[in-house]
Amino acid sequence: MPEATQNVFIQVRVNGKLHSREVEPRQLLVEFLREDLELTGTHIGCDTTYCGACTVLMNGAAVKSCTVFSVQADRAEITTVEGLEKDGELQPIQKAFGDCYGLQCGYCTPGLMLSALQLLKDNPHPDQKQIRKAIAGNTCRCTGYQNIFKAIETAAAVMRSAGHGD
Amino acid sequence: MYPRAFTYHRAGSLQEAVTVLSQLGEGAKLLAGGQSLIPLMKLRFANPVHLVDLNFISGTSYVRELDGALHFGPLTRHAEIEKSASAARVPILLDCAAGIADVQVRNRGTIGGSLAEADPSGDWATVLLTISCEVQCTGTSGKRTLKLSEFLKDAYTTALAHDELVSEVVVKVPPGNSGGAYIAFKRTAPVYPTASAAVQLTVEGDRCKDIAIGLGCVGLLPIRVNEGEALLRGQQITSKLIESAADAARVAADPQSDMRGSVEYKRQLVGALVKRSIHAALQRARGHQVEVSHIYA
């Protein structure tokens, strides 16, 4: 076992901003976001690829950032919850989670919103079954999910009428 | 949780990856989608000294139709297969791709990685054992092609030499009078199934011309139910025969008792899954559109 391994230089665009850093190969993307960039909106829940609290978008696709090494995000575009708001305006999914009481403690919410956004990008008219399937990788222990479904349906309607691409 | 420290290598081509593997020796492992390997590394069950990342190699993710076969690039993500119009022509492939874990895992996990990992609870091997599937392996000394049944050796063990990798997965498109279905029973989406059943059935009128029945998560490797298949092959398909095939599946299963269920429970379960899969496969073989989905506890 080597005592120390060589760090790797990576360039990652996070919420539109390019970051250049040297990282240890074993560092996980969620740690890079939280520790190096201090973007603590992405949460660590189970740290075992189960709960989805650490979900971010990597090149537009939802991934569990506890199960991706930072070095793999080199040259990638990452979107975290901090990147959703634009000019002080909440993204419709954020507003809908609030309006529909789609959260209680809020720990799972950033991950759930990013999974929901991938769904709405691929499918602006999701039915109930498709919504359930899209967030099957995100665990919420407070809400019982009903208000989360409502929030995603509400956001879908708002985004359709506003012609949101993202 | 941090894995043990390792040295990172980024391969520019599959050929470069196998060369690096042969130079680095047994302490090196390949990183594909990482959805099995990274959790194992975080638990420190897997402690590679070197990791060779395949994710930056271009042209390794594709689904191509060629001479009646589907060719999958080794790094084709489950999600890409789920969305592929070519793969949709073989419904059992869609059942599998669309049902693995959850969206996030399907966006990362790859078909080549799943087969090379040979996890006893993996989905792809169970499904692909029921249709004609070959695995192309590339090493420093060239390429060879193995039938999937020859490729899989034991739990977490394949025929791959240390300096070989899966370079393509080839699946023959079943004939028009054939239909398949894959159903897994899971507690929740992100966890491995408790048990699963894959059935590919070819009909001729109301007879079963050919059938393959595969069981997952109830043995160290996926299990083919040869006796159950023999009961149905060439026969008129009746509920009684389907029941007998399910009984044969219960006997063929070799489950272990764990947090997901006892041995007896899993035997019962896998029989029921075989019945449901045969019914869905039969409908599809007769040209009906049937949506199947995994069953959640």
Image: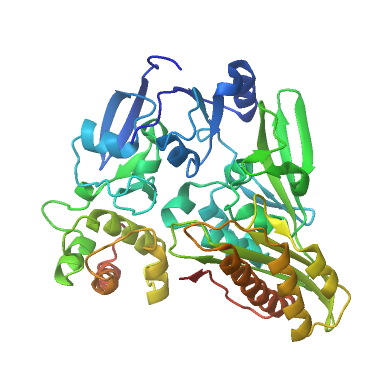
Q: Nearer the viewer, residue B215 or A143?
A: B215
The vertical placement of B110 against B48, above or below, is below
Within the image, what quadrant is residue A141 found in?
bottom left
Q: Is residue A122 left or right of residue B155?
A: left
Which quarter of the rendered picture does the C terminus of chain B lie within? bottom left
The residue lying furthest to the left in this view is A88
Q: Is residue A73 left or right of residue B292?
A: left
Which quarter of the rendered picture does the N terminus of chain B lie within? top left
The residue lying furthest to the right in this view is B234
The vertical placement of B168 against B80, above or below, is above
Where residue B246 appears, as percent x and y from the top left, is 71, 74
Identify which residue is drawn at 27% across, 74% down: A146
Q: Nearer the viewer, residue A49 or A134?
A: A49
Q: Nearer the viewer, residue B191 or A12?
A: B191
Q: Nearer the viewer, residue A9 or A112?
A: A112
Where residue B170 appears, as percent x and y from the top left, is 72, 49
Identify which residue is drawn at 78% across, 42% down: B146
Is residue A165 visible in this depiction of the protein? no
Where residue A24 appears, as percent x and y from the top left, is 34, 24
Identify which residue is drawn at 27% across, 67% down: A159
Q: Is residue B265 left or right of residue B157?
A: left
Q: Is residue B56 left or right of residue B181?
A: left
Is residue B19 visible in this depiction of the protein? yes
Q: How many marks?
A: 0
The vertical placement of A131 against B190, above or below, is below
- Color encoding of the figure: rainbow
Identify which residue is drawn at 71% across, 44% down: B152
Where residue A71 appears, as percent x and y from the top left, is 39, 30
